[in-house]
Image (cartoon, coloured by chain):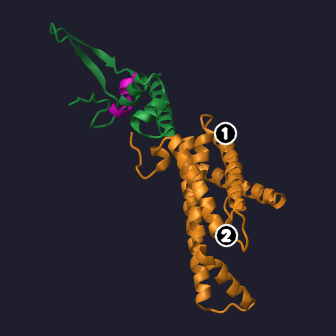
Chain colours: A green, B orange
Amino acid sequence: MAIKLPVKCPSCESPVQAIQLKCMECETAISGNFPLPDILQLSYEDQEFVLNFFLASGSLKEMASQMKVSYPTVRNHLDDLIEKIQKIKKNES
Amino acid sequence: MRVNPYQPFERFSDQILLMVGVIITLLGSFLAFAFKARFDGILDVHFVKEIELHQPFLDNVLNILVTSVLLFFLGRKLNPKTRWIDILNAIMVSRIFMYFSTLLNFQNFIGNKTDKLMAEFPEIPMDSNLIWILVIGILMIVFLVLYLIYLFIGFKVAINGKKSIIILYFLLVILLSEIILKIIFQFIHF
């Protein structure tokens, strides 16, 4: 079962940050404030979509064929994701 | 990514929609010939006494081409990534409701009822004739509304439209298309 990385606080919906990273080999723990990369701030389904887009070599047509949906549906979803990422970047700056 | 399974413009590829659209247009044109219907505008269907096989086919080709070009220009203005094929498919597939309306003239049903009513004109007897004409009128409006709804849905998917003002732009372009086609049909007789 794939474990989904939570990107928003379940209580107040604010973006979450990583405060500790740990080495699984030697148990070294690094504390700090590590904001999640922009792409990780998308929902799990949206991240899957971006990954599939990358694996399809950026071909929307191929993605549409694999996902069994129409080309405009895939294109529209990509445009919506681009807008989401731009909003995330704008909020950070 | 959630897709409405009852929404053909989200579900099916442009090749499938194009093929289905062409089949619908051909069958619809043949039905129109069988039930003596002419489409002299993107929103119009009229029943005639005499019809030739090529007439409804050419009506549909003209209606679909003119409207698809106008909607495509509007689509491009709203979203530069709009493709003409998606607009064309939306028009061809949604016109299935217009073709359904021609079935109402089965065995010249509408023609006969209208002739009986016109024979009594200017008197309008309140009989079953009038009731049938009212029922047919309501059904025609229902088919027209369904056609416009599906066409709008297809248009929205093609342009990734989200704002409600798009409805107004869409209706204005449909009206413009109707006016242009009416002018064209005045000069072209086939």
State which quarter of the image contains the N terminus of chain B: top left
Residue B36, label in figure:
2
Q: Amino acid at mark 1?
A: Lys
* Residue occupying the point 69% across, 45% down: B69
Q: Is residue B137 above or below residue B22?
A: below
Q: Amino acid at mark 2?
A: Lys
Query: Which residue carries the number 1 mark?
Result: B77
Q: Chain of mark 1?
A: B
Q: Position of residue B129 (x, y in %)?
A: 61, 87
Q: CA distance from mark 2 to mark 1?
A: 38 Å
Q: Is residue B124 above or below residue A49?
A: below
Asked whether residue B163 is in view, the answer is no
Asked if residue A92 lies in the magenta stretch, the reply is no
Q: Is residue B74 above or below residue A30?
A: below
**Which range of residues does the magenta coloring cover?**
A38-47
Side of B139 relative to A26 (left or right): right
- The 10 Å Cα crowd at callout 2, few under 14, some 14 to 19, many 20 or more, is many
| Element under disc 2 | loop
